[in-house]
Amino acid sequence: PKASSEIQSLANTFNMMLARLSEAWAQQHHIGERQRQFASDVSHELRTPLTIVRGYLQSTLRRSDNLLDHQREALEVAAGEADHTIQLLQDLLNLARADDGYMAYDLQILILNDVVTGVVQVAEQFSHRTILVEAKASLIPIYADANRLHQILVNLVENALKYSDEAEPVRIKLEQVDKQAVIQVCDRGPGIPLQQQSRIFDRFYRLDEARTRSMGGTGLGLSIVKVFVEGMGGQVTVRSELNEGSTFTVTLPISAVSL
Ligand code: ADP
């Protein structure tokens, strides 16, 4: 239908502009504090109206039973693009803040098991998938910023679900090794070729642009994971075999003393 393809092409143009703009921000490692603040303000200012646009689109879709097919399709495409762009802006905001240390980490002792349970419950509800949590101990302490830790887990779990078959469960393993909390997110998806394993943490890097674009996501998820984990004194690594699956491992200190 005409309306929907017009919206689609508009949305694509807008997304492309946004992606170029943000790539330019991301790649300039030496931009000053004021420019980063500007990037962060712009992200913030754009998010508000877009969230309102998405809200109206969604409520119109919900409340109208007499829409023609092409009208419904057009609204769905528009809502989907608004959603993607909001996610992109949120990711950029996170990165802009993390980059210049502007975002202060609110570090405190948390119980890792509880944070994981919260993320798993929401992810299971949204995806209708099973996530198995295997914890070596029921109270594993972790010294982290609650919001950042939450975001790290969400990004890894969303990827594991997104890139693996619906029939395959996603596993999360938790343990404490010496002064570190270790979190593993394992999937039985397609795996990541060895040559590309170090690059997936780069901004906007995606294995297969055509395939992954249709799955949603911004190509920023893992770079955010890396920035946050390292910002809290930890490390993130990947181990993956083609056709076997991938395991992302995050280690974080369990107390302020071990930082
Ligand atoms: P996004 O998922 O939004 O594309 P990410 O930064 O989270 O961006 O991931 C970068 C790329 O790494 C993805 O596009 C995908 O190609 C690959 N990837 C990430 N997680 C997995 C996974 N669990 N299994 C297979 N490939 C993955």
Image (cartoon, rainbow, N blue to C red):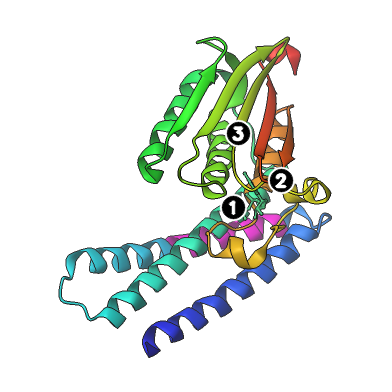
The numbered disc on residue 62 is none
Q: In the image, residue 48 lies at what x, y percent?
A: 43, 60
Callout 3: 10 Å neighbours few (<14), some, many (20+)? many
- Residue bearing mark 3: 186
The amino acid type, in three-letter code, at marker 1 is Asp
**Residue closest to the eye, 13 or 31:** 13
Amino acid at pointer 2: Leu
Residue range highlighted in magenta: 35-48
Disc 1, SS = helix
Q: Which residue is mark 2?
A: 242
The residue nearer to you, when weighing 30 against 179, is 179
- The Cα atoms of the two marked residues, 1 and 3, are separated by 23 Å
Residue 195 to residue 150: above or below: below
CA–CA distance in space, label 2 to label 1: 28 Å
**Label tally:** 3
Residue depicted at x 46% and y 21%: 114
Say which label, 1 or 3, has the lower sequence index. Answer: 1
Q: Residue at x 68, y 30 (%)?
A: 249
